[in-house]
Amino acid sequence: MTDSTPRPAIRSSRGRGRRPADEVRADVLRAVGEMLLRDGLAELSFERIAREAGVSKTTLYKWWPSVGALALEGYFHAVEDTLAFPDTGDIRADLTTQLHHFVALMTATPAGRLLTELIGRSQSDPELASEYRRLYSSGRRRLATVRLRRAQEAGQIRADVPVEVLVDQLWGAIYHRLLIPDEPVDEAYADVLIRNLFDGIA
Amino acid sequence: MTDSTPRPAIRSSRGRGRRPADEVRADVLRAVGEMLLRDGLAELSFERIAREAGVSKTTLYKWWPSVGALALEGYFHAVEDTLAFPDTGDIRADLTTQLHHFVALMTATPAGRLLTELIGRSQSDPELASEYRRLYSSGRRRLATVRLRRAQEAGQIRADVPVEVLVDQLWGAIYHRLLIPDEPVDEAYADVLIRNLFDGIA
């Protein structure tokens, strides 16, 4: 079997025909997400993704400009549910829930190592940096600000607070400790981040 | 002239004798700091530092385990005055002054590029990561918390606020935007960081 021959695993369940592209694409992203959360970034290559997802390398090259781009898109989908923003109507409780999930993901799975490595590499790789923003961070930022703006409309966050900045003072503060581990990252830390902002420190 | 021969420039002004080690050391750190703020990290090597500071490479190897370690120590000294923490008795005003200086340093000099590159490299280089914390970030953290604790004693920050966390929600939030430039870093941003914390966002 050559590299460009799909393995039987992804043959259509409806017979010998080709499966629709969006199904194959979703399967690849799912496989990449699983590989990343299991093994981290080090093991990832188009070769191995093609083997594990049962698609040809040609297909991968056609859809993704680089392994980094594919990794970022796969990771975004893999953590979408874990990092979903609940809306119980209480922004403080919902942020606590979401940030606890985020802390657990970053500290108890390879996700933390993966993201800090991608952020690290992107400091000297402008293409990866722009892919990181396009395929991961800008999307996560958007999801956070949607929930924060809803809280603002509900009067739970003051109208004159630019919610973009809260993203940096909550998730950004956690990234700061992940990237420069002078101090620990745990649920208590996340709770203080929220308390400082909602109660004020003065 | 061989590499291990000091250039005349660092010969003692008091004659042909050797200069005291701490003077030479201070001169090397000063030269490295100037080189970093002028040219960034890319141009830095023991070879070039030896040439510019007029000391032997042997001396550099004896005092610093790596170019990274020397760069970090030189940078720490180079920015110590710019990033000093004023104490006028008003913590909010003093943080504004300091953060404006920090923003200017990070955005208008090669310092921002230098630090993000060092943080970036340290994600896949455990030795550099530990040097970064030992020679730079832990020292900066200490200076910040000293000023914040004084404000706490003066009753300008609530007694139950762990000031360590404020470091992440002020400077850490700025690093977050420098490392993942989804949003701009400017004085207005620094002002909002301070306002969110002191006034509270609820």
Image (cartoon, coloured by chain):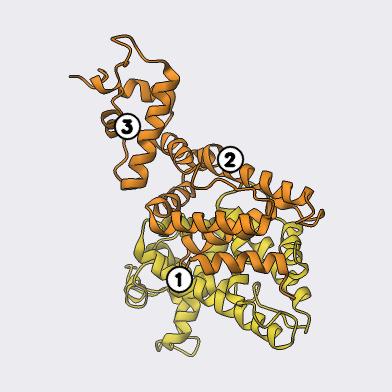
Chain colours: A yellow, B orange
Residue at point 40% right, 87% down? A18
Kindly identify the amino acid type of the residue bearing the numbered disc 1.
Arg
Q: Which residue is under mark 3?
A: B46
Q: Nearer the viewer, mark 3 or mark 2?
A: 2
Q: Nearer the viewer, residue A150 or B86?
A: B86
- Quarter where residue A88 is shown: bottom right
**Disc 1 to disc 3, C-alpha distance:** 35 Å
What element does badge 1 sit on?
helix
Query: Which numbered disc flags the more N-terminal residue, 3 or 2?
Result: 3
Q: Label 2 to label 1, Cα distance in Å?
A: 31 Å
Residue type (three-letter) at the residue carrying disc 2: Gly
Q: Which quarter of the figure is the N terminus of chain B placed in?
A: top left
Determine crowd level at label 2: few under 14, some 14-19, many 20+ residues with C-alpha closer than 10 A.
few
The answer to which of B6 and A107 lies nearer the viewer is B6
Q: Is residue A174 visible?
A: no
Please give the name of the residue rendered at 37% of the width and 29% of the height, measured from the top-left corner. Answer: B28
Vertical placement of residue B183 versus B137, above or below: below
Badge 1: few (under 14), some or many (20 or more) residues near its Cα, within 10 Å?
some
Q: Residue furthest front?
A: B88
**Residue B188 at what x, y percent from top left?**
53, 69
Q: Could you tell me residue A132's position as x and y percent?
A: 45, 68
Q: CA distance from mark 3 to mark 2?
A: 24 Å
What residue is shown with label 2?
A: B139
Q: Is residue A5 left or right of residue B78?
A: left
Badge 1 and badge 3 both on one subunit:
no
